[in-house]
Structures are given as structure tokens and as C-alpha cells.
């Protein structure tokens, strides 16, 4: 006996019979179907017995129409009964239980599309029965059963559908035929896997849960080119230009991401200035971002459309000798092409005005959509606010990791932090977490001192207030020098001062800042011979794919600060204003939201 005719499709949807396009879409559809069954079961469970027709007995409306009810059909209460809590949205005047069942499914669809925060179907017909029907071909006649057509519910449907056609689901084996096909069910071979596995235009929605989740644009198919806003650096030393760019679909082992929020970092300004030896123009900058996976290329297994992610400028393939060595977090799998501003296959996914646009650090988060290698993305907690955790893509992770991973600061230590920007504050936070007893902040901008002390600095000094070199001042202040020092500026002169401020015999100095191209560091060899150690760090020593999700978890559990780094939040169109705030020292981090 075929499934009762309680499911509707628009004529257009019925004609297209679109197949499922991806496992993600199939999982989403299956969830919709479970919700539908839940509502139907609850409808039957809570219905007062006095309002239910007997199993296998035709309702009054069917009797008048000369119809009989299938023996396997479901009955739902079609009338509101006082005192029994029957849902007020059901058509209380309806006498046809099939009509009520039809209405229940449509309301369930409405709830899924507009209420459920995790699975919002863009078209109600993407619940599993219809998705399966698309793939298996629904039989319009439904075989040899005698299921009655549903009556139209009184009043507007919750989802506003009009002109719906009724189809029968070939649930199981049908006794009749459909268009001459045995069993009443026609089967098609599985469609070929498209190059980019993604939700199609109908099902693209606010996936992933959490906050600040914008819907995907309805006009662009995930498997094709997407046009979106981006800030393009056409040449060094010039302001960024807001342009419409074309973002090609991801190729094999690539991921296309809808960026929700991105921050401005000194590294972006460093490359824009022309000092970066690997700087390529025109380019889309940005490397502190967070967003939602829009589509993935062939072979991607660790993320799927709808996942909440942070792009990574240091990848983690897990296969190269660097990834397999616990002493480093560097990965060389795509280092060569990334340094050239290209994807692993040596091409770019960005074009603007007919010109190729280079990628930046493998991330390019100054674009509403970006494409990254699948080893350059970390899946994170879907509940995390993206306009905050985007900072974990660089600055905070770098400074905090320099303390706990690279220097391995011990409880009771004395630390000196040169530069009180975002990275410097993250270093101070790390020193406090590690249990340092004395944390000295050094900066020529006294306006930063209050914030530094809020993060854990015990005192702050200005090198311009002293006639002696700052390293000599620190040696005198700390009875021989600090145990750990951190240079967070990118100035080679300060790097030397940081080393020479360390205590003889065991002092450790960590270089965190990035110096301009061609510059060199120097010191007297005796500084190292007498036991001082000079180190450097990249991304704080974190193995990115493994540890960024853990950092997000630490933030969500309030073990580390993130919100406190954000001093300004601006719309993306004001990106040049964000750079100005950074250059004038008025901001720690400015977050841009699309």
C-alpha cells in the first residue's frame, strides 16, 4: 500500500525532480523528516480520544465523497477540543483528518524553515520524503492504493504556499504501476558528484548554529562563481579599494568560506606598506577571520558546508616531517605556493575587472568569500561569536602561545614585554596565566598602560623617560635582568634590547614581531655565550588545526580573554578607517563585519 497522499510539491519542483547534491544536504533533509514524524506522532498522542476517528474508518468528509480510508493510514485529530491542549494552529473546523495531517506537515516545514537555529531548510520540499522522491522519482498516481487527496486547510498555510500539487510517496513497494514501471516506483542512476560539494540554491541557509550567522546569498550557486565585496590592494602604499570580485569554486582539497568577521592586524599593514619581501600585488589581504563553510571541493573530509571555521595562515597537513615533529608547528606542504600568493595548484581563485588577484597568507579574509586549502582551516564551536574568535586566527594566539609554548614561562618568573599592542597584551595575558610574579610592560605610548595593567602588567615604563638604554634600566630594576623577554614590535633594535635585558645564565628572549625585509639582528656574541637564549615564534607555536579549536573552547570557558582586545567594531566598508585607527594607536583590534 503506498504512503498516504499528504505531501505537496509545487509544479515547478515536481518537474525539476532535483537529486540530492551532497551528504550534507541529505543529512539536513533527514533531520527535517524526523521533525515531521515527531510532530505527526505527537499530534496523534495528544489528541483526545473523542476527537479521533477509528482506525480504518472513513471520516465524515470522506464518506460524503464516497471515499474509503486506507487501512494503513494515520488519523489525526481535526477539531480543537477544550481542556485537552490541542494546538490552536490546527484548523478546528476541518472534518477531514487527511486535511489536518497535511496541515501538520506544512506547519512542521514552516517551523524548520523559520525557527530551528541549526537546520533551516530554504524550501519546505527539501524534507527527506521529497528529497528521496526527487532521487527516486515520485509516481504521480501513487500506484494501486486508494489514498484520498487531502482537502485544502481553511486559512493561509503557515509557509504561504499556493497552487500546490498532491503527490503520493512510493513508500516501500507499491502494488500498482506508474507509467508502466513495475512496483509503482521508478529509479534513476545516482547523479555524478559535482566538482564542489555544497548545498544548492534552495537549501543554502543559516547553517552551523551559534550567533551572527548570515544566510547564504540566494542568487549564487555554490558550485559556480560567486560575486561579492572585497578590499583589493592594487599597489603598495595605497589605500584599499572596495571592489566586486569573482570567487571561483573550490577545487580538490579546497574550501570556500563565507567570511562573517575579520580583524585588521599589523601584518596586513606591513605587507600593504611594501616592506614584505613576499608581497604580491594586486592582492586581497586579511588573515584574522572567521566564517562558515559555503562549499568544499573533491576530497575534503574534515569540514562540510555549514561548519563554523577559522582560516589558518599556518596550515597543518599532518603528513610532512614538520607536522610529524612535536618541536615545531610549521608545515611546509603548501609553503611555496602560499608565499607566491597562489593556491596549491599554482592558480588564484580571485579575479576583479578581468585581472587575477593574489591570495594573502593562504587566507585573504578581506573578502566576503574566500577559498583556502583544506589543511588551512580549523572547525570550531558553532556557538562561538565569530566577531570575537576571529582574533584567534593570529594576534592573540601568537602572543599567548609565545609564552606557554615557546618560552614556557614558569611560576614566579619576571617578564618584560616590549610593545603593548594586541600581540603584546596577549603576551601579558599568557604571563599572568603562567604565574609570572612580575610583568613589566614597555611602550612609548602611555595611553596603553591602563589596558596593559588590566591584562596583568604589574608596571609599565616608557624608554623615552630614561637617559640610559632600556636594557640597562631593566637590568637595574630586576637585579640582573628578567627571566623572560618578548619583542612584539618588529624592530631589530628593540630585539637586541630585549635579549640584553635578560638575566645572565638563564634568560630567554623571544622574537614575536616581524621585521622589515632585509633587516638583520645583531648583538655581542658574549650575550649568548654567557647563557642567554634567543628564540623566535610563529603563531605562538600552536599546531593550528589541532589547537585553534581548543583556544576557542578556552575562550568560551573564560580561561583566556578575547572580547577585551576588541576596541572598535565597524562595517566592512570602513576598512581604511580601521587601518587609520591602528596606525594612530587608537585601537587594539578593530573588527570588521560583513
Image (cartoon, grey):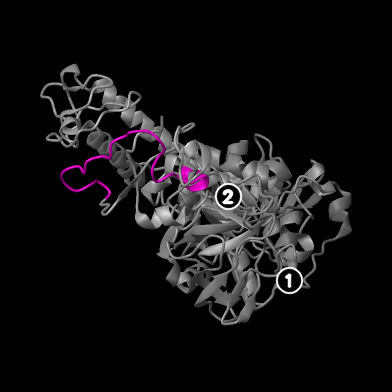
In this view, the residue in front, 339 or 531, is: 339
The picture places residue 102, in percent across and down from the top left corner, at 28, 38
The picture places residue 408, in percent across and down from the top left corner, at 71, 40
| Residue situated furthest top in the rendering | 49
Does the rendering let one see residue 420? no
Q: Quadrant of residue 65?
A: top left
Alpha-carbon neighbours of circle 1 within 10 Å: few (<14), some, or many (≥20)? some
The picture places residue 273, in percent across and down from the top left corner, at 63, 76
Tell whether position 384 is magenta. no
Q: Quadrant of residue 421?
A: bottom right
User: The C terminus lies in which quarter of the figure?
Assistant: bottom left
Task: Considering the whole magenta stretch, tell me its main secondary structure.
Answer: loop
| Side of 503 where 349 appears, left or right | left
Alpha-carbon neighbours of circle 2 within 10 Å: few (<14), some, or many (≥20)? many
Residue stretch in magenta:
133-159
What residue would you read off at disc 1?
A: 278
What residue would you read off at disc 2?
A: 426
Amino acid at each position: 500500500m503506498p504512503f498516504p497522499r499528504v505531501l505537496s510539491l509545487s509544479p515547478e519542483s515536481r518537474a525539476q525532480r532535483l537529486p540530492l547534491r551532497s551528504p550534507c544536504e541529505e543529512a539536513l533533509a533527514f533531520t527535517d523528516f524526523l521533525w515531521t514524524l515527531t510532530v505527526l506522532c505527537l499530534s496523534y498522542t495528544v489528541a483526545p480520544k473523542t476527537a479521533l476517528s477509528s482506525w480504518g474508518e472513513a471520516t465524515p468528509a470522506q464518506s460524503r465523497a464516497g471515499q474509503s480510508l486506507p487501512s494503513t493510514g494515520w488519523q489525526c485529530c481535526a477539531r480543537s477540543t477544550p481542556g485537552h491542549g490541542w494546538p490552536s494552529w490546527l484548523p478546528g473546523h476541518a472534518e477531514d483528518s487527511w486535511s489536518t495531517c497535511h496541515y501538520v506537515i506544512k506547519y512542521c516545514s514552516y517551523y524548520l524553515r523559520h525557527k530551528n537555529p541549526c537546520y533551516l531548510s530554504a524550501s519546505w520540499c527539501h524534507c527527506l520524503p521529497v528529497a528521496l522522491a526527487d532521487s527516486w522519482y515520485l509516481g504521480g498516481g501513487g500506484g494501486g492504493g486508494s489514498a484520498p487527496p487531502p482537502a485544502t486547510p481553511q486559512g493561509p498555510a503557515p509557509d504561504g504556499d499556493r497552487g500546490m500539487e498532491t503527490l503520493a510517496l512510493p513508500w516501500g513497494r507499491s502494488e500498482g504501476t506508474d507509467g508502466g514501471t513495475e512496483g509503482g516506483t521508478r529509479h534513476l542512476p545516482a547523479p555524478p558528484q559535482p566538482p564542489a560539494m555544497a548545498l544548492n540554491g534552495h537549501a543554502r541557509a543559516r547553517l552551523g548554529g551559534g550567533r551572527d550567522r548570515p544566510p547564504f546569498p540566494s542568487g549564487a550557486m555554490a558550485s559556480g562563481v560567486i560575486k561579492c565585496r572585497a578590499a583589493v590592494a592594487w599597489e603598495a602604499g595605497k589605500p584599499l579599494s572596495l571592489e566586486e570580485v569573482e570567487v571561483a569554486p573550490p577545487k580538490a582539497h579546497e574550501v570556500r568560506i563565507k567570511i562573517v568577521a575579520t580583524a585588521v592586524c599589523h601584518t596586513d599593514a606591513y605587507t600593504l606598506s611594501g616592506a614584505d619581501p613576499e608581497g604580491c600585488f594586486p592582492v586581497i589581504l586579511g588573515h584574522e577571520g572567521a566564517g562558515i563553510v559555503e562549499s568544499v571541493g573533491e576530497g575534503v573530509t574534515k569540514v562540510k558546508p555549514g561548519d563554523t571555521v577559522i582560516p589558518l595562515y599556518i596550515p597543518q597537513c599532518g603528513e610532512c616531517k614538520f607536522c610529524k615533529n612535536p618541536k615545531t608547528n610549521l608545515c611546509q606542504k603548501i609553503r611555496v605556493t602560499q608565499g607566491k600568493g597562489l593556491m596549491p595548484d599554482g592558480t588564484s581563485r580571485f579575479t576583479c575587472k578581468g585581472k587575477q588577484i593574489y591570495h594573502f597568507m593562504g587566507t585573504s579574509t578581506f573578502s566576503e568569500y574566500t577559498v583556502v586549502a583544506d589543511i588551512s582551516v580549523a572547525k570550531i564551536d558553532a556557538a562561538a561569536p565569530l566577531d570575537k574568535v576571529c582574533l584567534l586566527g593570529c594576534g592573540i594566539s601568537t602572543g599567548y602561545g609565545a609564552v606557554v609554548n615557546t618560552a614556557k614561562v614558569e611560576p614566579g618568573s619576571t617578564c618584560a614585554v616590549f610593545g603593548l599592542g594586541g600581540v603584546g597584551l596577549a603576551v601579558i595575558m599568557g604571563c599572568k596565566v603562567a604565574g609570572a610574579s612580575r610583568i613589566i610592560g614597555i611602550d612609548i605610548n602611555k595611553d596603553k598602560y591602563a589596558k596593559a595593567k588590566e591584562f596583568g602588567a604589574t608596571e609599565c615604563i616608557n624608554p623615552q623617560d630614561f637617559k640610559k638604554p632600556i636594557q640597562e634600566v631593566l637590568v637595574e630594576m630586576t637585579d640582573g635582568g628578567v627571566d623572560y623577554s618578548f619583542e612584539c614590535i618588529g624592530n631589530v633594535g628593540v630585539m637586541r634590547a630585549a635579549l640584553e635585558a635578560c638575566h645572565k645564565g638563564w634568560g630567554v628572549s623571544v622574537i614575536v614581531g616581524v621585521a622589515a625585509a632585509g633587516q638583520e639582528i645583531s648583538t655581542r656574541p658574549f650575550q649568548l655565550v654567557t647563557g642567554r637564549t634567543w628564540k623566535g615564534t610563529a603563531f605562538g607555536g600552536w599546531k593550528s588545526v589541532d589547537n585553534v579549536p581548543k583556544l576557542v573552547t578556552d575562550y568560551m570557558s573564560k580561561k583566556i580573554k578575547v572580547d577585551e582586545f576588541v576596541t572598535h567594531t565597524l562595517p566592512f566598508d570602513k576598512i581604511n578607517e580601521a587601518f587609520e585607527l591602528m596606525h594612530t594607536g587608537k585601537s587594539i583590534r578593530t573588527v570588521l563585519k560583513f
